[in-house]
Image (tube, grey):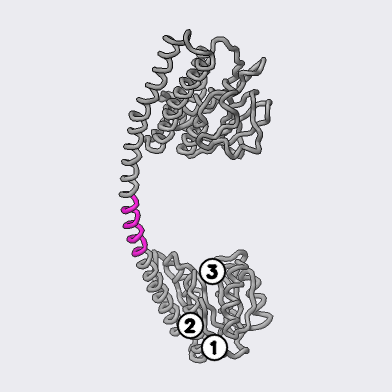
Amino acid sequence: MNIETKSTPTSVEILIAEDSPTQAQHLRYILEQQGYQVTAAANGRLALEAARRHKPTLIISDVVMPEMDGYELCRNIKTDPLLSDTPLILVTTLSDPQDVISGLECRADNFILKPYDERHLLSRVRFILANQEVRMGERAGMGVEIFFNERKHFITADRLQILNLLLSTYDAAIQRNKELSLTQEDLKQLNTRLKSANKDLEAANKELEAFSYSVSHDLRAPLRAIDGFSDIVLQRFSAQMPSEAQRLLNVVSTSSKRMGQLIDDLLGFSHLGRQQLSRLPVKISSLVHEIVEELRKEQSDRHVEVGVGNLPDCVGDPSLLRQALVNLLSNAFKYTRKKEKPTVEVNHQLSEGKTIYFVRDNGAGFDMEYAGKLFGVFQRLHSSDQYEGTGVGLSIVQRIIQRHGGRIWAEAEVNKGATFYFTLPVESSPNAAAHHP
């Protein structure tokens, strides 16, 4: 905000007590733009020492500071015979009604609401300086006892000081009320926009569902026809066909099957964002053992050494977490296919008090230079000729982990295996294990 500068006597010296260097510098700039001489202290103790060395015309002090806060600084200033007539403005949020009483008790001259408006701040400074001579005639000998918040408080500030402080408090309350009114209006407008955006989102979701239905039914039918007729031609007429024609028909059949799988994976990925997430206790160790047994049955011709640690239970959606673990373990089995002694390890570790699960294998691995592409849809770091797949599996795993509030990352080295790390909300209730799926 640009502030119009006015000619101000350079004899006006203002001392700032502020522990934030940024806030102190900002306040110094505003005041120096008006021609005031400004010095700053990082806390109340240093400000008191500076005031006793060289009496300022005005003190502006933050309330919350280390070593000596603004209230204590004000009390010391007002009880020092040489400094008691120095006006002091407290900068505070006024978040507690007790702040007003504390300001009265320490005989502060004024409040400035924090965060402050520059014009408002300068008007307060000019007001205090203009009324300083009037206050010189007031005496602080009279006092008044008040009862506030179930406590008695004895106020010894002079009448003009009390009036100024209460008026500044009232002014600050009005200013805060205006800010709240503007905030409420902004919230109303935001709520209106959110309702409109929600309607657009609902319409987009319906369109997406219609598209998914079309993909599911309209595209699969011709793919099944292509695959089926290719098989019929091969079965009935392969003896009459050249070997190259047979090879090409096999490519057509394989490609149609792969396209069907790709459609299934893509539909599964799109449904993840709309699938309702349940929060149940899940025994990860049991789930991993079940999946490993299923993979062993599917690949009975292989021997993969699998080690499963004592994995902590977690909280999440059992079906989605099973899908994520199936994808990770299937990849581990797949990419160790060319190893003489394939090994897979599923375990956990602690880092900064957090549980990190991991699935590690000694398979093909990958170049970490391309790790950024690892979880992208249809991104593959190995060709389909080497290892089958559609490039959607890890994207699904990432989406599931993120929906649970966790994260997933990987470390690998070419031909030396890969490790996939992920975090999940850990089950903390001792009785939760009895409710696992």
Name which residue lies at 47% across and 22% down: 252
Give the quadrant of residue 357: top right
Could you tell me how far apart the alpha carbons at marks 1 and 3 are, in whole angstroms? 29 Å
Q: Are marks 1 and 3 in contact (CB under 8 Å)?
A: no
Q: Nearer the viewer, mark 3 or mark 2?
A: 2
Q: Residue at x 62, y 29 (%)?
A: 419
The type of residue carrying mark 3 is Val
- Element at badge 1? loop
Query: Dot 2 lies on which element?
Result: helix
Using the rendered image of the protein, determine whether residue 107 is visible from the camera's viewpoint: no
Residue named by callout 2? 123
Q: Which of the two labelled residues, at mark 1 and mark 3, occupies the earlier sequence position? A: 1
- Quarter containing the C terminus: top left
Give whichever of 87, 39 is nearer the camera. 39
Name the mark nearer the viewer: 2 or 1: 1
Task: Please state the extent of the stretch shown in magenta in the rendering.
Answer: 184-198
Spatial CA span between label 2 and label 1: 12 Å
Residue 194: image location, x then y, percent: 34, 54
Q: Residue furthest top?
A: 239
- The x and y percentages for residue 52 are 66, 80
Judge by depth and name the residue closer to the eye, 302 or 247. Answer: 247
Task: Locate residue 307: give its quadrant.
Answer: top right
Label 3 SS:
loop
Closest to the camera, between mark 1 and mark 3, is: 1
Which residue position is annotated with label 3? 63
Is there CB contact under 8 Å for labels 3 and 2? Answer: no
Circle 2 residues within 10 Å: few <14, some 14–19, many ≥20 = few
> Which is more toward the observer, 155 or 174?
174
Magenta segment's dominant SS is helix
